[in-house]
Amino acid sequence: MDPSQNKRTTFDIIVVGAGASGMMASLAAAGKGASVLLLEKMERPGRKINITGKGRCNITNTAPLSAFLEKTGPDPKFLRNVFSRYFSQHIIDFLNQQGVDTVEERGGRVFPVSNRATDVTETLINALRKEGVTIISRCRVSGILVENGCIFGVETADGEQYTAQRVILTTGGASYPGTGSSGDGYQMLRQAGHHITPILPALVPLNTKGDLAEKLQGVSLKNVTASVWMGGKKLGEEFGEMLFAHFGLTGPIILTLSRRFAVELTKPEGMSVHIDLKPALDHKRLDERLLREINENGARQVQNMVRTLLPASMVELCLNQLDIDPFKPAHQLKGDERKRLRNWLKEFCFDVKGVRGFSEAIITKGGVSTREIDPKTMASKKIKGLFFAGELMDVDADTGGYNLQIAFSTGWVAGEAAAIM
Ligand SMILES: Cc1cc2nc3c(=O)[nH]c(=O)nc-3n(C[C@H](O)[C@H](O)[C@H](O)COP(=O)(O)OP(=O)(O)OC[C@H]3O[C@@H](n4cnc5c(N)ncnc54)[C@H](O)[C@@H]3O)c2cc1C
């Protein structure tokens, strides 16, 4: 859109980056009567929203505040005030009022009934138009303009300058750079004197050593526990679903572990992931179960017995690794073989090589230090008139709709605060 069409050349507020947080910040500011210019690098706003939730957009999570905050980091206190002002029910109500019906699924996850993430993006764009926000696409901001500690505008890669006394930076993180979020904001802010805590890929699949995972590519596991170990010490574990891929491990619990141990994963030497395929049974109970299988169906081949304990596609690999004859009758399984089978089922191990990188990371950990941001307004404590929202800041969360809610909530608070400053 050409700003001259609006016959306006100066704006109260410039918002940089039309993702979830930038669009919400623009709406909130315009709703308070401010004139808003929204600059977006890509050809259309909201490219990342369009790919969220595998194209379905897990908009938010209905978890109560304290449980919600537990899913966020690194400083959940920073978000408490923000969520007390704009939370899950606000975004649900907003979308419902705009004609996007929503549905709550397992674990409090909220999706559009249409299962189309693009409905969320289009609704936000339409609302921006209704509020009179001027959007300029294909406009990459390259720097912020600061004088005597006050912001007065932004500069674009084409050498244009747009002036405003308030600027909200919402350029997102560095993950999935094809969506436009390629870490531009960090560079601009470092130059302006802000501290950026180290940025790391998180909610990201893991590369593992050897070809074990590749052999199981496509196999998914439910109700298993995956634990991360470093030099003989267990760092933590998650229970749920995971998946084997040609490069290693992925799926919900692996992604969650990658966020929790993002820092440790920068030096993965000596790190391994152990999968407990039978977490409901301790060693003793599992042994009793194996003995029962052998006693009740001793004539059955070992491979058929193991099939009752594992997905069929894992049985051959399991017995191969344990060097157990798959065709012999189960009653011929020796005590030592039974023990090795039990240990394998409780601790299927993978050595970790590292993470897949920003191109496959759902989020970026790290960003503008929250110590330099007023938690009530999202205003910079260093540069007057500068505000932040979304993933650009050092805030992150697990999968489940938490990250988009952070973007919507911080966007809303920044937009309102900038408008009334
Ligand atoms: C594959 C995938 C699936 C996901 N699924 C979910 C999910 O279902 N639920 C959930 O809660 N979270 C999900 N997330 C995370 C969520 O999408 C992000 O946390 C959220 O979009 C962050 O919003 P943001 O506004 O801070 O940044 P972004 O959405 O990344 O928006 C930043 C915008 O700024 C623009 N920009 C960047 N630099 C410049 C510049 N120099 N000049 C102008 N514009 C610029 C970008 O083009 C972009 O449009 C997913 C992420 C990915 C990658």
Image (cartoon, rainbow, N blue to C red):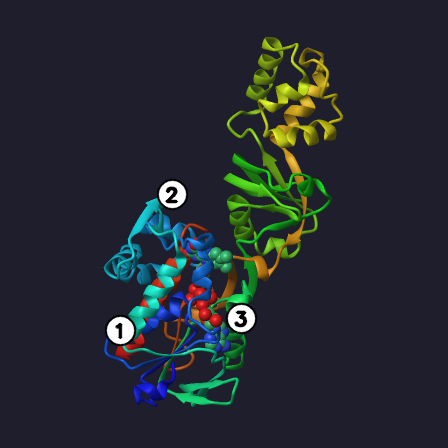
Quarter of the image for residue 19 reads bottom left
Mark number, residue 76: none
Query: Looking at the image, can residue 77 be seen?
Result: no
User: Which residue sits at x=54%, y=76%?
Assistant: 187
**Cα gap from disc 3 to disc 2, whole angstroms:** 31 Å
- Name the spot of residue 274 as percent of width and height, x first: 62, 38
Q: Are marks 2 and 1 in contact (CB under 8 Å)?
A: no
Q: Is residue 313 left or right of residue 325?
A: left
- Give the label on residue 107, or none: 2
For label 3, the crowd category at 10 Å Cα-Cα, with few meaning under 14, some 14 to 19 and many 20 or more, is some
Mark 1 vs ligand 1: CB under 8 Å? no
Q: Residues within 10 Å of mark 2 (few under 14, many from 20)?
A: few
Q: Secondary structure at mark 2?
A: helix
Query: How far apart, in angstroms, are the residues tagged by discs 3 and 1?
Result: 30 Å
Identity, as a three-letter code, of the amino acid under mark 3: Gly
Under tag 3, what secondary structure? loop
Disc 1 is placed on an element classified as helix
Labels 3 & 1 near each other (Cβ < 8 A): no
Nearer to the camera, 150 or 99: 99
Q: Which residue is pictured at 66% across the width and 55% down the height?
A: 267
Q: Name the amino acid, label 2.
A: Gly
Q: Within 8 Å: ligand 1 and the Cβ of disc 3?
A: yes
Q: In the image, is residue 200 above or below residue 350?
A: below
The reply to whether residue 43 is in sight is yes
Closer mark to the observer between disc 3 and disc 1? 1
**Who comes first in sequence, dot 3 or dot 2?**
2
Task: Name the spot of residue 189 as percent of width and height, x first.
Answer: 50, 77
* Horizontal side of residue 21 vs 229, given as left or right: left
Q: Which residue is mark 1?
A: 130
